[in-house]
Image (spheres, grey):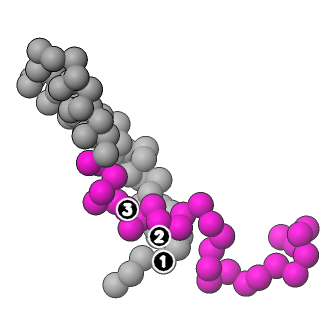
Amino acid sequence: MALSYKGRRRVALLVLVVGLPIYILVASVLATTIAPESVLVTLLLYVGLGIVWILPFKSVFKGIGQEDPNATPRRFDDDP
């Protein structure tokens, strides 16, 4: 079952407010545990971890910044 537009917005907000800070903590602990000596390897590790978190949530964030496709169209700009 696919999530509705409002459901996707709520899940996206939950991921950003709760999930992302937890992922940042886990990623930083992982990076300091591995602690490569090279600055380039450390940079690549952080860039890789920065990209990996979004891959599972790509479908949740897709189209969130646009208007609700199921909403009734507004006739004028000042309609509520």
**In the structure shown, which secondary structural element does the residue marked by tag 1 occupy?**
loop
**In this rendering, the label closer to the viewer, 2 or 3:** 3
**In the structure shown, which secondary structural element does the residue marked by tag 3 occupy?**
helix
- Residue receiving disc 3: 58
* Residue reaching furthest to the top: 37
Disc 1 to disc 2, C-alpha distance: 5 Å
Disc 2 to disc 3, C-alpha distance: 15 Å
In the rendered structure, find residue 37 and report the number of the disc placed on it.
none
The magenta segment is 52-80
Question: Would residue 65 appear left or right of 18 to someone viewing this image?
Answer: right
The tag earlier along the polypeptide, 3 or 1, is: 1
**In this rendering, the label closer to the viewer, 3 or 1:** 3
For label 2, the crowd category at 10 Å Cα-Cα, with few meaning under 14, some 14 to 19 and many 20 or more, is few
Where residue 57 appears, as percent x and y from the top left, is 34, 60
- Residue receiving disc 2: 7
Question: Can residue 29 be seen from the camera position used here?
Answer: no
Looking at the rendered structure, the kind of residue marked 1 is Ser
Where residue 6 appears, as percent x and y from the top left, is 53, 70
Is 4 above or below relative to 29?
below
Question: Would residue 53 appear left or right of 5 to someone viewing this image?
Answer: left
Where residue 36 appears, as percent x and y from the top left, is 11, 20
Q: Are marks 1 and 2 in contact (CB under 8 Å)?
A: yes
Looking at the rendered structure, the kind of residue marked 3 is Lys
